[in-house]
Amino acid sequence: MAKMIVVLLFLVVSISALLIWGRLSWSQYTTNLSEKVMNRAIETQEVVDLDEVDELPSPVKKYFHHVLKKGQPIISKVFISQNGGFRAKPEMAGWSEMKAVQYFSSEPRAFVWDSQIFILPLVSINVCDSYIDGKGSMTGKFLSLFTLINSHDEEELNAGALQRYLAEAVWFPTSLLPSQGISWEEIDSSKAKATITDSGITVSLEFEFNERGEAVSVYTPGRYREVKGKYELTPWKGRFSNYIEVEGYRIPTKAEVEWHLKDKTYPYWKAELIEVRYDS
């Protein structure tokens, strides 16, 4: 009996040590990426000049006048924390709890998204998405230890990551201004196409605006989705709601995204912003 207890204690201590090591290793990995993004961000003395939006499509012009004020600093760095849910497969009925933090740089364009997705109350998967130097990356580990996903610098992944950056720029809206490299093309009275080029990659999204001038959705008929190790162009949509003012900028605090599959709509991510910090 005593020998069995010793063996059990040894196993408990070993497993605990392995889990702690995994958490520390993951934390170091994501910290290195986020510090790279934030430390390389170029601080600017530029401020918002709403005169530059006068010739834009009317819904876009209304949007900028709604979310920005003349003379505000152009945002260079952003920190966001999120709580929400994630669905790993279309056939899943419920949502897994998700907690995440995210770091953005507007120049150079970059982000790191560090998430923890709970598949059971005490069992989680860590997922880190990033876009740095024009290269997308996705890493996922079970219990911070066992690699499930490890994709880096693939053409489809790079384009998808830049599309994500463009969609999530509603959280730091000065990055959507024409002076920051975004071109706008009118679609109709409530929609316009935004196009961005970075590191030789060009992507576009259709933005939809409501009567108040809020961006309420983004859409593309083709974003790359990984299916059984291959990428397929799939319609993709994001929705935004619950706008509030944060440090003088108006941004949505709720968001959700979905794939439009051939036979169904597949919502797979939703979140509410818990904290937002800007550094101009």
Image (cartoon, rainbow, N blue to C red):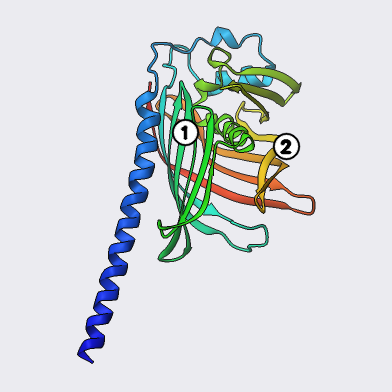
42 with respect to 96 (left or right): left
Dot 2 falls on a residue whose secondary structure is strand
Residue extending farthest bottom: 1
100 with respect to 88 (left or right): left
* Spatial separation of the CA atoms under disc 2 and disc 1: 22 Å
Q: Which residue is mark 2?
A: 222
Q: Quadrant of the C terminus?
A: top left
Label 2 Cα crowd, 10 Å radius (few <14 / some 14-19 / many 20+): some
Q: Amino acid at mark 2?
A: Gly
Dot 1 falls on a residue whose secondary structure is strand
Q: Amino acid at mark 1?
A: Phe
Q: Residue 19: x and y, percent?
A: 33, 62
Q: Can you say whether 86 is above or below 110 in the image?
A: below
Q: Residue 14: x and y, percent?
A: 28, 69
Q: Which residue is mark 1?
A: 111
Q: Residue 236: x and y, percent?
A: 69, 41
59 with respect to 124 (left or right): right
Rendering quarter of residue 196: top right
Rendering quarter of residue 247: top left
Q: Residue 123: x and y, percent?
A: 43, 64
Residue extending farthest right: 262
Q: Can you say whether 93 is above or below 86 in the image?
A: below
Task: Write the residue at 44% across / 27% down.
Answer: 105
